[in-house]
Image (cartoon, grey):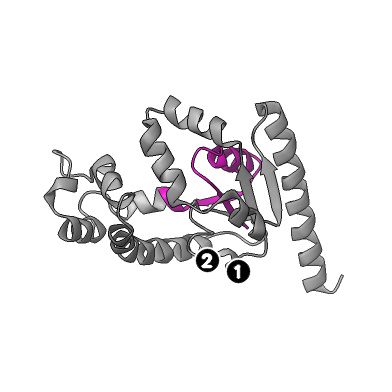
Amino acid sequence: MGLTGGIGSGKSAVSARLAARGAVVIDADRIAREVVAPGTPGLADVLAAFGPTVAAPDGSLDRPALGRIVFADPQARARLEAIVHPLVRAETARRIDAIPAGGIAVHDIPLLVEVGAEGGYDLVLVVEAPRELRLTRLEGRGLPRDEALARMASQASDERRRAVADVLIDNGGSLDDLDARVEKVWRDLLARRDAKAASASGG
């Protein structure tokens, strides 16, 4: 299953709740950080492409500095994606191969719609929340409003995400509301898995 949602929608909260219920979550953002960790070929390639201004004093990637560049310049963003995306795909494939039989994999991919990857999943779950609530959440994390707006503008619209969604989770309410919605999705996933297994065995 592919899981996506705009920045500030609460996708990570949904991902964590699915993981707590037994899903194997493959977090594209986390993998993207790991493939450009200090000492990796990925970090060397990013520094070669963008220069020393995106290196932190400790030698790690200065993400805020890089973010200011790529979210303001589509060509710069494309250069970064050309470096990072192949590395993420390779690591993702390795983790998928390690999932035991019967496991439910959830691919947490913020830019699933933007990169046109929705066709690669049997089910696409989209998390959404009202725009102002998303901005409030992002400002609460320390992201200035203008930067939050720029990042939201660089992503797919709610309409585009809804167009590819098999399941839509509204995360504009309370955490109890969210828990109830995720529980229903999880039960549906288990039912789909069991039906698929029965069909494969001829049962």
Position of 25 with respect to 35 (left or right) is: right
Figure check: 119 above or below 72: below
Going 43% across and 65% down the picture, which residue do you hit? 89
Residue type at tag 1: Gly
Crowding at mark 2 (Cα within 10 Å: few <14, some 14-19, many 20+): few
Residue type at tag 2: Gly
Instruction: Specify the quadrant that holds the C terminus.
Output: bottom right
What element does badge 1 sit on?
helix
Figure check: 20 above or below 109: above
- Which residue is the site of mark 2? 116
- Which residue is the site of mark 1? 119
> Is residue 23 located in the magenta-colored stretch of the structure?
yes
Going 46% across and 44% down the picture, which residue do you hit? 152
Contact flag, marks 1 and 2 (Cβ < 8 Å) = yes
**Which stretch did the figure color magenta?**
1-29
Instruction: Specify the quadrant that holds the N terminus.
Output: bottom right
Residue 18, percent across and down? Answer: 63, 43
What element does badge 2 sit on?
loop
Q: Which mark is residue 179?
A: none
